[in-house]
Image (cartoon, rainbow, N blue to C red):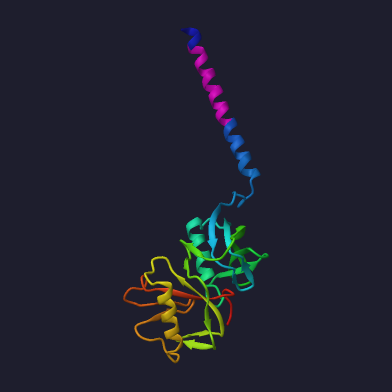
Amino acid sequence: MQVLSRSEPRRGRITVLALVGLLAAMTLALVARPAGAANPTTCPGFRVLHDDRIGAATFPAGSYTLTLQDTSLDCRSSAALFARFLEDYDGVLPKPWVVSNEGPGKASFLRASGDRTTPGFLVELTARSKGEGGTSPDLGKLCPGTFTVNSTTVVGPLRFTRGAFLIYLPAGSGISCNRASVLFTRFLGAGGALPAPWRVLNQTATFYKPSNPKRSAFRIEPLSGAGRR
């Protein structure tokens, strides 16, 4: 019994020394890793349905991986932002966001404040699509074919220049592609005013009825992608 009683303090000292060593190792690891050096999160599987662009940045149709560079973002929020930027009609992103072109299929989205920018997320093409079209949970359904505007026409606050356009049906829309085409033809021929009760979201060229904005929505996008018209 005497032997056991004398060994207990020793075991206690060994345990304390082991804990001190562990804490020291953890401290060294934290010092060795510089601030902000945490591994970025990657989010694969975002689909771009047609060859698109945002300002000077081009995005071939295909699958993309999003790399998060800001800890306030996650895969869901960054995918929603990228979809929103692709939907933009004039290529001017909502503040404070700006796009930095890094080559075909690769771009960084940054937050700008004065002369400074802070990283947001990076998008990069991982696999090209064999063709254009299809449906994306973020962008909705891309209607087949293109819609031709024969002469530059103003519809409400938006200007549609002569050329080819695409029609998208946002997720949850109950309108068919044919119905959306008929409605857009009607809007172009209305002499500038948007027929009641229809409204339009200027930044994304999304037409909708206020009584049921989700089910009635369809979106118009220039074939060449977002940019000043």
Q: How many marks?
A: 0
Q: Is residue 18 magenta?
A: yes
Residue 57 position in % (x across, y down)? 63, 69
Q: Which residues are magenta?
A: 5-20
Residue 143 position in % (x across, y down)? 48, 70
Q: Residue at x 35, y 85 (%)?
A: 196
Identify the residue at the far bottom of this view.
191
Q: Residue at x 40, y 76 (%)?
A: 179
Q: Residue at x 53, y 59 (%)?
A: 46
Give 108 or 113, whichever is nearer the viewer.
Answer: 108
Quarter of the figure that contains the C terminus = bottom right
Q: Is residue 123 magenta?
A: no
Give 47 or 227, whichever is nearer the viewer.
Answer: 47
Identify the residue at the far left of this view.
211
| Image vertical order of residue 190 relative to residue 54, above or below | below
Residue 138 position in % (x across, y down)? 47, 63
Q: Residue at x 48, y 66 (%)?
A: 139
Identify the residue at the far right of this view.
103
Question: Residue 129's quadrant in the figure?
Answer: bottom right
| Image vertical order of residue 130 relative to residue 15, above or below | below
Q: Is residue 133 visible?
A: yes
Residue 19 position in % (x across, y down)? 55, 30
Question: Residue 223's quadrant in the figure?
Answer: bottom right
Q: Is residue 116 visible?
A: no
Question: Residue 209's quadrant in the figure?
Answer: bottom left
- Horizontal placement of 147 versus 101: left or right? left
Please, what is the dominant secondary structure of the magenta stretch? helix
